[in-house]
Amino acid sequence: MRIALDAMGGDFAPGPNIEGAISAVAENPDLQIVLVGDKPRLEQALDHSGYSGRAIEVFAAAGVAGMDEKPTEALLKKPNCSIAVCWKMMAGKEVDAVVSAGSTGAVVAAGLRTRLFLKGVKRPGIAVILPTLQGRSVLLDVGANPAARPEHLHQYAMMGEIYAREVLGTCNPRVGLMNIGSEDGKGNELVRDTHALLTKGPLKDRYIGSVEGRGLYQGEADVLVCEGFVGNVVLKVSEGMAEMMLRRVAQDVMEQLNHERHLAGQAFQNIAKRYSHHESGGAPLLGVDGICMICHGSSNGRSIYNALRGAVAFEDRRINPQIVAQLAEVPALN
């Protein structure tokens, strides 16, 4: 498998990207990684790392889409920036996957410009795996499509169901629709029309109806669908809440167990590591003809390593062919 890694993407690039790439190829001898970005800088960094193998190569790109730039404007001003070049390589079948910790907006916008969609897909969506009281669940879309239509959410449900089954190993995943209430008829027009599609589509036997926000972490559904604006807010609030709660609880416990503060501190470090985004790596942009893993901007070397592993697993489990086959069963959406 050959992966284009946006080596200039992320808050601390290119260090973590190179570190993650070296770890990934050391584990998988069949993996090839193309570091895309500032070629002289990347070659110098590779030399300093001590890496001397042939599984990692460098491909030149001009500039990077910054986190503070509007994605479309950045891509217009810098058409050959690192993330744009990664997508061009995948569109040209030079690589099988794209991995980036750069601006999520730029990653998605560059992908949409290629129109590199799977057959039948109307609009790709970003899926994240979140911990729940019942295990783990898939939430999508979390930012790729803030202006979704009912048919988009219906497709997200089908793609998310396949992803939960193949990646989480969940048999017959329960699919829910994020809403302000669980009763039929609740929500805006988008939610009500999506509900109507799900109740008569191929997932009707696994569709459990609307799920309120609190139900996400209760594990009421294995796949929870929403439009990108709502999903992104849910994700960012969840990250902030988790960080706040861990810090406050850690402070309170260590004050109560003052004589064993080192033991309490180590315990909370272990908990924080277990639920850290560094362990999950990247979130896939489902629906593209290829594989795209989007990583957190603050990704470290382990994040990138796990995202690269995730791209390999995505290919091994043949998720895209299953998505195409599932969508083909719904002719009204094609």
Image (cartoon, helix red, strand yellow):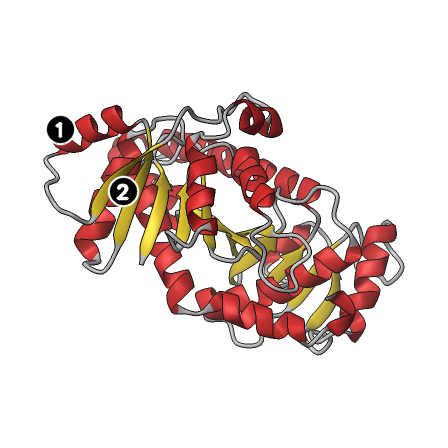
- Residue 90 rendering spot, x and y as whole percentages: 44, 50
Q: Position of residue 221 (x, y in %)?
A: 63, 63
Q: Residues within 10 Å of mark 1 (few under 14, many from 20)?
A: few
Q: Mark 2 points at which residue?
A: 20
172 left or right of 60?
right
Q: Name the residue under label 1.
A: 48
Residue beneath the point at 52% across and 64% down: 163
Question: In the image, residue 169 lies at what x, y percent?
Answer: 46, 71
Q: How far apart are marks 1 and 2 (CA)?
A: 15 Å
Q: Nearer the viewer, residue 1 or 281?
A: 1
129 over 325 or under it: above or below: above
- Name the outermost residue toward the front: 92
Quarter of the rendering containing residue 246: top left
Left or right: 210, with 284 as reference point:
right
Residue shown at 18%/58% (left/top)?
29
Quarter of the figure that contains the C terminus: bottom right
Residue 68, image quadrant: top right
Q: Is mark 1 on a helix, strand or loop?
A: helix
200 sits to left or right of 100: right
- Name which residue type carries label 2: Gly
Residue at x 79% of width, y 71% of height: 199
Mark 1 belongs to which amino acid? Answer: His
Left or right for 306, reference 68: left
Observer-nearest residue: 56 or 62? 62
Q: Name the residue rendered at 75%, 43% in the picture.
A: 147
